Amino acid sequence: MTNSRKTGLAFAAVGVLLLIIGFMQSWNVALGIFNLCLISAVMALGVNMQWGYAGLLNVGVMGFAALGGMSAVLVSQAPIAEAWNASWSRLFISAICFAATIAASIVCYRKLAPGRNRNLALTLVIVAGLFVTRQFLDPAISSIESIEPAKTGFLGGLGAPIIFSWLIGGFVAAGIAWCIGKVALGLRADYLAIATLGISEIIIAVLKNEDWLTRGVKNVTGLSRPVPYEIDLQTSPWFIDIMTWWHGGALEALDSAARQQALKQFVIDGSSIFVKLCYSGLFAGVLIIVLLLSVRALNSPWGRMMRAIRDNEIAAGAMGKDVTRRHLEIFVIGSAVIGIAGAMLTTLDGQFTPTSYQPLRFTFLIWVMVIVGGSGNNMGSVLGGFLIWLVWIEAEPVGVWLMEAGTGWLDEGNALRLHLIENAQHMRLFFMGLVLLLVLRFSPGGILPEVVPRQKSSD
Amino acid sequence: MEAVTDFINALVLLLNFIVVPGLSYGSQLALGALGITLVFGILRFANFAHGDTMAFGTMITILVTWWLQSKGVSLGPLPTALLALPAGILLTVLLLVITDRSVYRYYRHHKAVPVTFMIASMGVMFMTNGIVRFVIGPNDQRFLDGERFIVRARDFKETTGLAEGLSIKVSQGLTIVIAILLVAALFWFLQKTRTGKAMRAYSDNEDLALLSGVDPDKVVLVTWIITAILATIAGTLYGLDKSFKPFTYLQLLLPMFAAAIVGGIGNPIGAIVGGYVIAFSEVMVTYAYKKVFIYLLPQSLEPEGLLQLLSTDYKFAVSFVILVLVLLVRPTGIFRGKVL
Amino acid sequence: MSFLSGVNMVGGYGGADILKGCSIEVDEGEIAVIVGPNGAGKSTAMKALLGMLDLKQGEITFRGKDISRLTPQDRIAEGIAFVPQTNNVFTSMTVYENLEMGAFLRDDDISGTVSKIYELFPILEEKKDQLAGELSGGQRQQVAVGRALMSRPAVLMLDEPTAGVSPIVMDELFDRILEIRDKGVAILMVEQNARQALHIADRGYVLVIGENRHTDTGAALLADPEVRRSFLGG
């Protein structure tokens, strides 16, 4: 089939690009990019489920990714006993108050007839409930945040291995997606887009400001790792043995003093590559699992129904399919996948910095991946994730290089030249937009268009 | 007597920290939301590039302002940026017309679904954002000159003898005056001119408008021109009032969308009302009322906390919550949207 | 050669052909009515005359000129006006503004035409500053016809003008249509209420699956026992 050949060719091209980076820059850089490619691919798969399978426009990818990142912190950080001791009773009461508020508003909503009175009662219940909750929450928060604010000042986490956060991140993102889906699905498509844009901004605002939760803009650094530390590897005899064996030929040629020196360098370089390879293995594992499940789901009756709904919502609805419910399902699942990817990303970074979540990078770039790769095609999304991330990363050095070359005729200290070189990195935004528009216009199916496993209809 | 002074002091506080900032921020949002609502009414898609269109127009205005300042040109007490505005508008019109010709027109002629337009607008957003950052950089830029205040807090206190001061910045006054003039001009245009009526008709019932001989290309062109004017002026006023940073303009998308939807998307009056609703809610919910209550309540009842409902960092949450409420209770918005 | 005629029209909306070689003609000062069962292609035939679908075959002439290649907008500029069956007024605009939009392509003074339309439909003058969306179904239909007449068309096409209005309003509307005809306008109308429509028709077409089945004067069709049996319910 030509399509599978095209897929193979496209991925081979990406592989060649990575190899070129490996040879030209360094294997460390190439692997670093590869790891982010894997994460981007998972994220793109999540968006593809929502957009490609169901036609749902989620413009809040950033928020769900950040929820995954938050989970990484909350799962892996050690609990701060002092903070818990100082605040647990108040936290407990405020949690109860909060739950009671929600329960009361649900009761109000169900028992009262729709109309002005119900709206009024709901407002009263919610305002009063939140007021009471805050009576307990505010002191609890200030007691938490006052404990060693420079070092901790938050509750900490569960102290569990960080790899569990990938799962938890998925669940947290799914939960929030369920809430937002309940409100915005079933309305017009563009309202969902704007609602998701809003929720993502709010999630980031919460993460930036609720210091007791994730230290806010003070960031959480030094997250634990699911893979060994370089420094440990460098002192492990088995690793040194591997390196000695691997670089045997090169080491043979040197005298013993130089050999010791060279081996040390090999071990240092090797350790960082080894760590990256470990990550690659983990991420690739997740990617393959998600991909396999996606492909199976897409080809199952459920997936066919999804596509039917996407292609003709009215007809599917008339045939008795619960369109809103199916949409909610796919929206929740897709967001969960994005959450998983977000947790993986924070794990890889080893730190959680809320300010780094920017919509252009975390929402719109993922969209470019999905559209360029091929909406509705899982392999397309993976390819898009790889390709676009590569371009995004490499556009910066290439842009700077181009600007330097292009302005070579100007003086070294020329203001225009300096400005162009300094701002060259921003041109990649321009370039990404251009790629998106070109693909959308001239090849709306993307590089690997959706494969529709059915006979072509007469029109 | 003291009770009266206390009451007036409390009023001045509210005026200074809620009414004046709310009016000026609301005017900025209203102008921005008007652009979104016009594009929605005529071209029928949610334009994600609108924030960056504002940033682009403001950037041009800033560059021309700097050039004028370097030539020693000034408007006396008023900001030089007002002189630079026409240039900003002109280039923004150019930008939007080029975008329409090269991007949106194709989809319009092929009767693409609104979602395709939206995704295309994301591409345009990326490109515009790239241009803005490339030319002026991602950092804060200030370009306000001339007189800073219409009313200074200190002068106000000295003249009135009150404990609380009222300050009105030139940028705030300008924002409100220009917004009123601009909105009046827009409504005159939509209600009274042939082209304006054609736009309303096209927005109301595209097929029937075509049957009446309305030229769709002309309507779309005029829509983009008006959008460029509104966006550039809104962006410049916002930049004068606060400061110019490309990222902030991207973030303004949310409150502007919220304003347009809350008022009833596609409805200009709705966009204006929505702008003020969002702005006042943001300001009121994030203001700390402690001092107001100190003036109003007897000493024994003085509040302990700040009496702030939400920290200012959550102002986006306010627009979002209002948006969600409207979507739940009345999805068509306050003024039954979808038409001009 | 009639004033407006579509001869041997074949075509549809992209899929299967709806029109399979039907011909429709109308002359000045004459009412032509197209009737027929559901799915016969009545509205499609009218829209073909207006240029709203691509014809594979057939020729459309107006005032002896071939207009087959013109866009709907250009045909309107030539003097054809069309009142769609639904969504035929600008709901968010006032009655007067609706009339104004009807005269959008005119550059001259429209006040004379407006007062003629007020004479024809007095209710419109009364409600001229009200939004068209707030009017009753029958009143809206009057606005729609009024809007179409504002361009002073030579041909007025009406797609089921009486759909969804009460019998009294229908009679009233038909009276107005007769008045318009008497001013020399050619009227082409698609109607569900076949019997009443044929009463006022100078020319009647019975369409069945995209072909002409019967063509005669309205009175003759009403008298034809086969037409009565098959299409008028006895």
Image (cartoon, coloured by chain):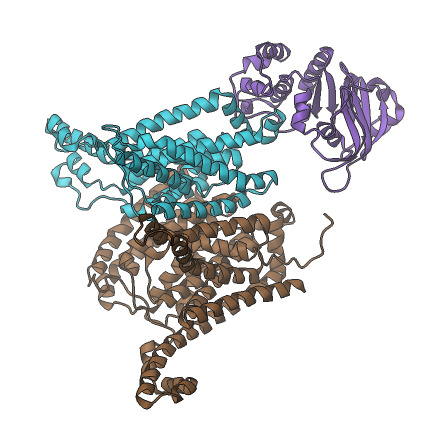
From the viewer's perspective, is residue A285 above or below residue B188?
Answer: below
Residue at (38% x, 35% y) in the render: B88
Q: According to the rendering, which colour does chain A have?
A: brown
Chain that is coloured cyan in the picture? B
Q: According to the rendering, which colour does chain C have?
A: purple
Residue C199 position within the rendered picture, expressed as x and y whole percent measured from the top left:
79, 18
Residue C183 position within the rendered picture, expressed as x and y whole percent measured from the top left:
71, 10
Residue A152 position within the rendered picture, expressed as x and y whole percent measured from the top left:
24, 64
Is residue B27 rendered to the left or right of residue A80? Answer: right
Q: Nearer the viewer, residue C27 or A70?
A: C27
From the viewer's perspective, is residue C203 above or below residue A337?
Answer: above
The quadrant the N terminus of chain A occupies is: bottom right
Q: Is residue B338 in view?
A: no
Q: Nearer the viewer, residue A249 or A450?
A: A249
Is residue A427 rendered to the left or right of residue A387? Answer: left
Residue at (77% x, 19% y) in the render: C3
From the viewer's perspective, is residue A35 above or below residue A358?
Answer: below
Residue at (34% x, 43% y) in the render: B318
Residue A81 falls in image quadrant: bottom left
From the viewer's perspective, is residue A182 above or below residue B155?
Answer: below
Is residue C123 rendered to the left or right of residue C41? Answer: left
Q: Is residue B32 in view?
A: yes
Residue A23 position within the rendered picture, expressed as x and y whole percent measured from the top left:
45, 71
Q: Nearer the viewer, residue B301 or A260?
A: A260
Is residue A142 rendered to the left or right of residue C180? Answer: left
